[in-house]
Amino acid sequence: MKLHGSEGGLLMELEAIAAEGKRILVKGKMMGQIPMQVVLGPQEIREIWKMSSIALWWKALGMLLFGRNSC
């Protein structure tokens, strides 16, 4: 999966997301070249939940069900 910035440039290319013990590992490349591995533990997951809202989850659900441009 490729993640682009607001100007359209490639920021990150995700290659894998996996559970390992009590952590979530995200593997990929920054800007298409720099290998990276992000480790998410319980504290980071809590912070993600705090940063999100019900409106954001509804928006994401709508995008999944009805396509990218429908919301």
Image: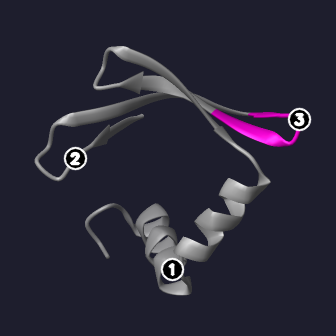
Residue 38: horizontal and vertical position, in percent?
58, 34
Residue 59: horizontal and vertical position, in percent?
43, 76
Q: Earlier in the sequence, mark 3 or mark 1?
A: 3
Q: CA distance from mark 3 to mark 1?
A: 30 Å
Q: Nearer the viewer, residue 70 or 47?
A: 47
Would you say the residues marked 3 and 1 are in contact, meaning their CB atoms lie under 8 Å apart? Answer: no
Task: Classify residue 16 as left or right of residue 23.
Answer: left
Instruction: Tell me the quadrant of the picture where the C terminus can be found.
Output: bottom left
Residue 2: horizontal and vertical position, in percent?
35, 35
- Residue at mark 1: 58
Dot 3, crowdedness within 10 Å: few (<14), some or many (≥20)? Answer: few
Q: Give, as a three-letter code, the residue at label 3.
A: Gly
Q: Based on the picture, tell me whether residue 20 belongs to the magenta stretch.
A: yes
Give the residue drawn at x 10%, y 48%. 7
Q: Earlier in the sequence, mark 2 or mark 1?
A: 2
Q: Nearer the viewer, residue 60 or 50?
A: 50
- Residue at mark 2: 5
Q: Nearer the viewer, mark 2 or mark 1?
A: 2
Residue 21 image label: 3
Region rendered in magenta: 19-25
- Secondary structure under tag 1 reads helix
- Secondary structure under tag 2 reads loop
Residue 24: horizontal and vertical position, in percent?
72, 40
Q: Is residue 30 above or below residue 9?
A: above
Give the residue drawn at x 86%, y 42%. 22
Q: Is residue 54 above or below residue 40?
A: below
Q: Give, as a three-letter code, the residue at label 2.
A: Gly
Q: CA distance from mark 2 to mark 1?
A: 23 Å
Residue 12 image label: none
Dot 1, crowdedness within 10 Å: few (<14), some or many (≥20)? Answer: few
Q: Is residue 54 above or below residue 23?
A: below
